[in-house]
Every structure is written in structure tokens, then in C-alpha cells.
């Protein structure tokens, strides 16, 4: 047992003696590397993107504005040769852009118009050429008669009825681009027939 302890200690000493030069060499390399890094001057250059030929562009900060509109305003669009569009008015009967509204109650009147060209009737333009007659007529009118209530006039059916706002129930959202990189979220709230 004493001989095995002697051989183990001898092995340990021999290993330590052999590893010392390698440890000393690695310490020397490490110090040399640190000294070399200290000698190298560091320059902080800002390198632009080579594909950015127009210079730095301002990035959008994500300005969002939400506008509340009744769900009756969701049905605009083009169907075959007919265009359906809405016109929005304030209390002074002035035509307004709904995206500029700060309060949904400021919208007082809405008109749904149907625009098409009447090919059977023509008119002469400024140069004397016959053109098909453009026609635009109101088919529905919505008048705010209270804080949460609208009076609707359907000109095609010659009927009137009332609807109420349910602003807590959003049925659809659209996002459109506004001015200066801003975005407008149009939130359409539910309207239900009044009882």
C-alpha cells in the first residue's frame, strides 16, 4: 500500500513539473495579447447602409388615431358600374372628413349616395362632345336625433325608422394611412333598430 502511494505521488509531481512550462507559456501569450490589444487604436466609424441611396429616412413612430363610426358606414364600394359612397356632415351641414372627428357625436348627418353613368341620356361637354350623363343620388339619409339615436330615411323604399348606437360592440376595424405617417383606425360600432 505504501508503494502505491509512493507511485501516485511520484506521478503527481511528474505531471505538475511537465505542465508548468505550458501554463507559463499560456500566461505569457495572454499578457502579450492584452498588450497587443492596448497598442491597436480603436476608431468608431458609423457605416451607412450602402443600399440607402436616399439617406436616412425618418421612421414612423406609429401614431394611431381611432375614429368611431356607425356600422351603417361599412357598405361603401364599387358594385359593377355603380359606386356607393358616404358623405359625412357636422351640425352646421358642412361636408367633413370622418377621419378628422375627435368625438363620434360630432357626426350629425350621413348620406349614402349611389353614383353611376346614365348611357341613355347625354350632355355636351366644354368642347361640344356628347358624353354619358353622370348621375349621383341619395338613397339613404341618417340624421342624429339624440346622443345615441339616428333617424333613417330610405328613399328607395320611402320609409323611415330609428336606430340606436351600441358603441361598446365593435363589429369591424379598418386601418387607413393618414397624414405624416400616422394611421387612422376606423372602428365601426353596432347599430340596432330602436324599439
Image: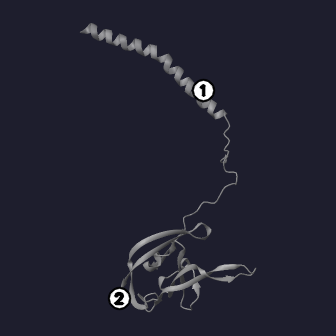
Give residue 97's quadrant in the image.
Answer: bottom right
Q: Secondary structure at mark 2?
A: loop
Quadrant, the C terminus = bottom left
> Badge 2: how crowded within 10 Å, few (<14), some, or many (20+)?
few
Q: Residue 18, percent across and down?
A: 45, 13
Q: Mark 2 = which residue?
A: 194
- Residue 47 drawn at (x, y percent): 67, 46
Q: Is residue 10 left or right of residue 80?
A: left
Q: Residue at x 53, y 82 (%)?
A: 113
The residue located at (62%, 33%) in the rendering is 37
Q: Residue 59: give x, y in percent of width and height.
A: 60, 60
Q: CA distance from mark 1 to mark 2?
A: 87 Å
- Vertically, is 11 above or below 44? above
In this rendered view, identify the residue nearer to me: 116 or 174: 116
Residue extending farthest to the left is 1
Residue found at x 29% / y 11%: 5
Residue under pointer 1: 32
Amino acid at each position: 500500500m505504501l508503494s502505491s502511494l509512493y507511485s501516485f505521488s511520484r506521478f503527481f509531481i511528474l505531471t505538475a513539473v511537465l505542465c508548468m512550462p505550458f501554463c507559463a507559456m499560456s500566461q505569457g501569450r495572454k499578457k502579450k495579447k492584452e498588450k497587443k490589444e492596448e497598442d491597436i487604436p480603436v476608431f468608431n466609424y458609423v457605416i451607412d447602409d450602402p443600399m440607402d441611396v436616399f439617406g436616412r429616412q425618418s421612421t414612423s413612430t406609429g401614431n394611431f388615431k381611432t375614429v368611431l363610426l356607425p356600422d351603417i358606414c361599412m357598405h361603401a364600394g364599387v358594385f359593377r358600374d355603380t359606386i356607393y359612397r358616404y358623405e359625412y356632415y357636422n351640425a352646421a351641414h358642412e361636408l367633413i372628413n370622418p377621419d378628422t372627428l375627435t368625438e363620434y357625436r360630432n357626426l350629425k348627418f350621413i348620406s349614402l349616395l349611389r353614383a353611376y353613368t346614365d348611357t341613355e341620356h347625354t350632355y355636351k361637354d366644354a368642347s361640344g362632345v356628347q358624353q354619358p350623363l353622370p348621375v349621383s343620388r341619395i338613397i339613404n339619409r341618417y340624421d342624429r336625433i339624440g346622443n345615441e339615436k339616428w333617424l333613417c330615411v330610405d328613399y328607395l323604399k320611402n320609409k323611415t325608422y330609428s336606430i340606436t348606437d351600441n358603441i361598446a360592440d365593435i363589429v369591424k376595424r379598418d386601418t387607413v394611412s393618414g397624414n405624416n405617417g400616422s394611421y387612422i383606425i376606423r372602428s365601426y360600432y353596432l347599430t340596432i333598430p330602436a324599439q
